[in-house]
């Protein structure tokens, strides 16, 4: 149980285009989802917390107009990188908090590697 | 100073050796402590979870938390080549927001 999927797994786009990444909880309802980015050989940096039916909460330094997050249902959250630039190239990972009896655990998706040319 | 400090390694050990990993932290509000394993280009996988201080054992894995020293450890006994991965410590104050260490890259040589 507690499977989280992400789509696409890899995307290459041209500078200036927008890219949408989907995060789905497959076998549980996720009241809260999180979006992280990870640069090579570095740890995960939390970008935003997404609660179903409400606006996302962004971490300091993360541009909310550039990284649009939508959490329209209990099983789906999307991250749209708008007007992507090469410096946005990174590994984006989502996680979901469900109804696990283990408090404060998150289940992670497999990640999406974004390359902006 | 980072909230969670973890030596990135890399750490290379022969098969069968004990792998010892650790993290230190500064936030005394942290009460939930986790270890995640991340294979290359994959998402992190929850390995061990501990609440407050103490030890927890699961098969070849042992997690230890010493809140008085703000120090947590993960031990892997009888290490296997399949244990080669990056190990991330993570912790939370109970608000579901995780603070991660930098991750330690481990290679177990056959």
Image: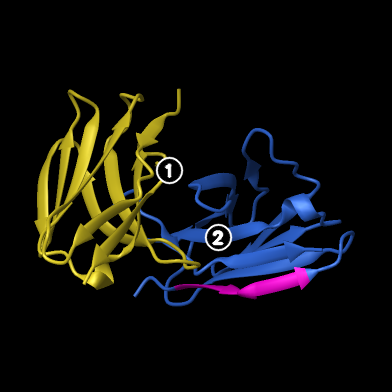
Chain colours: A blue, B yellow
Instruction: Determine whether, in the image, residue A44 is placed left or right of residue A82.
Output: left
Q: Nearer the viewer, mark 2 or mark 1?
A: 1
- Answer with the quarter of the image where residue A9 lies: bottom right
Q: Residue at x 65, y 75 (%)?
A: A8
Instruction: Determine whether, in the image, residue A110 is placed left or right of residue B54.
Output: right
**Is residue A65 depicted above or below B5 in this figure?**
below
Q: Which residue is mark 1?
A: B102
**Main SS type for the magenta part?**
strand
Residue A18 image offset from top left, x and y in percent: 83, 63
**Is residue B102 depicted above or below B79 in this figure?**
above
Residue A8 colored in magenta in the image: yes
Q: Residues within 10 Å of mark 1 (few under 14, many from 20)?
A: many
Point out which mark residue A93 bears. Answer: 2
Quarter of the image that includes the N terminus of chain B: top left
Contact, mark 2 vs mark 1 (Cβ under 8 Å): no
Q: Residue at x 82, y 57 (%)?
A: A84
Residue A106 colored in magenta in the image: no
Residue A21 image offset from top left, x and y in percent: 68, 67
Q: Are marks 2 and 1 on the same chain?
A: no
Instruction: Determine whether, in the image, residue A117 is placed left or right of residue A26.
Output: right
Residue A109 image offset from top left, x and y in percent: 49, 67
Q: Secondary structure at mark 2?
A: strand
* Mark 2 vs mark 1, CA separation in Å: 15 Å
Closer to the camera in the image, B88 or B104: B104
**Is residue B19 depicted above or below B96 in this figure?**
below
Closer to the camera in the image, B101 or A20: B101
Closer to the camera in the image, A67 or A10: A10
Q: Residue at x 81, y 46 (%)?
A: A65
Q: Chain of mark 2?
A: A
Q: Which residues are magenta?
A: A4-12
Point out which mark residue A2 bears. Answer: none
């Amino acid at each position: 149980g507690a499977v989280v999927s992400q789509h696409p797994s890899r995307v290459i786009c041209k500078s200036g285009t927008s890219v949408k990444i989907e995060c789905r909880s497959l076998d549980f309802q996720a009241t809260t989802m999180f979006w992280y980015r990870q640069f090579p050989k570095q740890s995960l940096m939390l970008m935003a917390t997404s609660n179903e039916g409400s606006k996302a909460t962004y971490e300091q330094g993360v541009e909310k107009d550039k990284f649009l997050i939508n959490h329209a249902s209990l099983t789906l959250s999307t991250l749209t990188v708008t007007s992507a630039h090469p410096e946005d190239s990174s590994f984006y990972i989502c996680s979901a908090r469900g109804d696990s009896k283990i408090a404060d655990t998150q289940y992670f998706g497999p990640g999406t590697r974004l390359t902006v040319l | 100073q980072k909230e969670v400090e973890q030596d990135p390694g890399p750490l290379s050990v022969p098969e069968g050796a004990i792998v010892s990993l650790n993290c230190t932290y500064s936030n005394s509000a942290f009460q939930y402590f986790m270890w995640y394993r991340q294979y290359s280009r994959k998402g992190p996988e929850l390995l061990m979870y501990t609440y407050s201080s103490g030890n927890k054992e699961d098969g070849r894995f042992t997690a230890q938390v010493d809140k008085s020293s703000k120090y947590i450890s993960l031990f892997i006994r009888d290490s296997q080549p399949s244990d080669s991965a990056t190990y991330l410590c993570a912790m939370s104050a109970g608000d579901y927001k995780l603070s991660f260490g930098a991750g330690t890259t481990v290679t177990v040589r056959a």
